[in-house]
């Protein structure tokens, strides 16, 4: 019988092993040979498989040979480079080493990311990236910049996204890069950074009709196309404007975010519309009010109107790109200071009658309707907001006399 001398390690189909990829199974054949390079058919032992690369599968002791051959043994490499595979007799000194071959990193593919969006100003967070062909040297990139990446598996990575990545609204590409040899950059998954929004419902006493608010000013074409809060006491310089006032709009309001209770803590302001059913909407007439100059955070919400007493939320609320509806209409507990105008059937709203916009309803608030009586148009003295000043406008300062805003200065 022929005596075992060495082993031949080759591709399963014969010949030298060609270029391979990390993470992809490679099938090899190992043949027991004598000094004349004939197969030693009576060898039925096992060999120990090692490599100059790192094997994630297939290393160690094999199954038994059959007729001097191990026909199809699978190995998987977890790193890239030029490597060899060696088979060593488990019960003896005989060895055999393959040719040197290149193992490339694969091109990664992404299938999903989580989360898919955040709000301007939020803290840094951990992004989960799912896909295929990830390797331990894969790098997640945010808008083309590398981020600290942790390899979980060939199908998942996690990456540290920085707070500085969340400073501007936009849609940014998330990619995964595998280094050479081989390697490459994956497909793109979009990540969205949104501005924070305010999602509020409230009612104005002046135009309230028992179920909602009249839109007479809008119907008569009296509401200005540019926001009206650029005069004292608001002095708001915002450029909010439209070419057409959207349907169902009752008037403009001014929305303010405060990190504390006093005006010195004001973080941002926006002019917006209030609809007949009480929802505050952006200038498109449907979307929640978007803030372009504020970060996500906890804020008091202050609402100003040109002839109603200003109101503020009872507590801070979480403001981000999915802000939960804050409904002032449901009770006085929603208002800072626990006071609001009781309207109808347990519904509450803003007190009408502050013509002087000094935050207190008194004799000074009769002056406007008195001076403008029988005039029409978009006037602060039009306290019921029907476009015409008459006796009905005197009702509000009369009924609400000595009421004052609870919004702190």
Image (cartoon, helix red, strand yellow):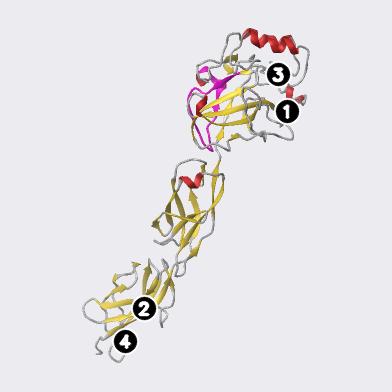
Task: Residue 283: give x, y in percent of width and height.
Answer: 66, 34
Span highlighted in magenta in the image: 309-332
Q: Report, in whole angstroms, how far the alpha carbon at label 1 lies from the one at label 2.
A: 83 Å
Q: Quadrant of residue 42?
A: bottom left
Task: Residue 135: give x, y in percent of width and height.
Answer: 41, 62
Q: Which residue is mark 1?
A: 224
Which label sits in the foreground, 4 or 3?
3
Which label sits in the foreground, 2 or 3?
3
**CB atoms of marks 3 and 1 within 8 Å:** no
Label 3 packing within 10 angstroms: few (<14), some (14-19), many (20+): many
**CB atoms of marks 4 and 3 within 8 Å:** no
Q: Quadrant of the N terminus?
A: bottom left
Q: Report, in whole angstroms, how far the alpha carbon at label 4 lies from the one at label 1.
A: 96 Å
Q: What mark, if any, has residue 39 been given in the picture?
A: 4
Could you tell which of marks 2 and 3 lies nearer the N-terminus?
2
Q: Which residue is mark 2?
A: 29
Q: Farthest residue in the bottom direction?
A: 36
Q: Which residue is mark 3?
A: 385
Q: What mark, if any, has residue 241 been given in the picture?
A: none
**CB atoms of marks 4 and 2 within 8 Å:** no
Q: Quadrant of residue 14?
A: bottom left
Residue 314 part of the magenta segment: yes
Label 2 packing within 10 angstroms: few (<14), some (14-19), many (20+): some
């Amino acid at each position: 019988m022929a005596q075992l001398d060495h082993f031949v390690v080759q591709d399963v189909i014969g010949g030298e092993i060609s270029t391979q990829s990390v993470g992809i199974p490679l099938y090899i054949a190992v043949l027991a040979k004598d000094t004349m390079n004939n197969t030693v058919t009576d060898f039925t032992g096992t060999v120990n498989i090692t490599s100059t690369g790192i094997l994630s599968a297939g290393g160690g002791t094999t199954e038994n040979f059959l007729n001097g051959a191990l026909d199809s043994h699978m190995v998987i490499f977890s790193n890239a480079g030029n490597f060899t595979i060696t088979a060593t007799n488990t019960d003896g000194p005989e060895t055999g080493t393959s040719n040197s071959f290149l193992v490339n990193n694969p091109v990664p593919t992404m299938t999903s990311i989580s989360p898919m969006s955040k709000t301007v100003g939020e803290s840094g967070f951990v992004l989960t990236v799912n896909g295929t062909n990830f390797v331990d040297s894969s790098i997640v990139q945010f808008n083309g910049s590398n981020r600290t990446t942790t390899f979980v598996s060939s199908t998942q990575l996690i990456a540290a996204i920085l707070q500085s990545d969340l400073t501007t609204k936009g849609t940014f590409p998330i990619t995964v890069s595998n280094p050479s040899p081989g390697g490459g950059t994956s497909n793109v998954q979009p990540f969205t950074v949104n501005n924070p929004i305010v999602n509020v419902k409230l009612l104005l006493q002046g135009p309230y009709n028992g179920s909602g608010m009249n839109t007479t000013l809008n119907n008569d074409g009296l509401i200005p196309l540019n926001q009206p809060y650029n005069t004292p006491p608001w002095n708001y310089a915002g450029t909010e404007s439209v070419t057409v006032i959207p349907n169902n709009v009752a008037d403009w309001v001014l929305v303010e975010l405060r990190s504390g209770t006093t005006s010195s803590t004001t973080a941002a302001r926006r002019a917006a519309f209030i609809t007949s059913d009480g929802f505050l909407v952006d200038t498109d007439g449907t979307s929640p009010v978007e803030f372009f100059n504020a970060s996500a955070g906890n804020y008091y919400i202050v609402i100003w109107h040109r002839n109603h007493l200003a109101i503020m939320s009872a507590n801070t609320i979480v403001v981000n790109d999915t802000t939960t509806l804050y409904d002032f209409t449901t009770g006085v507990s929603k208002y800072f200071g626990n006071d609001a105008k009781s309207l109808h059937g347990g519904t509450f709203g803003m007190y009408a009658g502050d013509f002087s916009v000094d935050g207190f309803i008194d004799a000074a608030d009769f002056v406007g309707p008195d001076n403008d009586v029988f005039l029409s148009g978009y006037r602060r003295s039009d306290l019921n907001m029907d476009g015409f000043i008459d006796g009905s406008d005197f009702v509000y300062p009369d009924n609400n006399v000595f009421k004052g805003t609870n919004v702190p200065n």
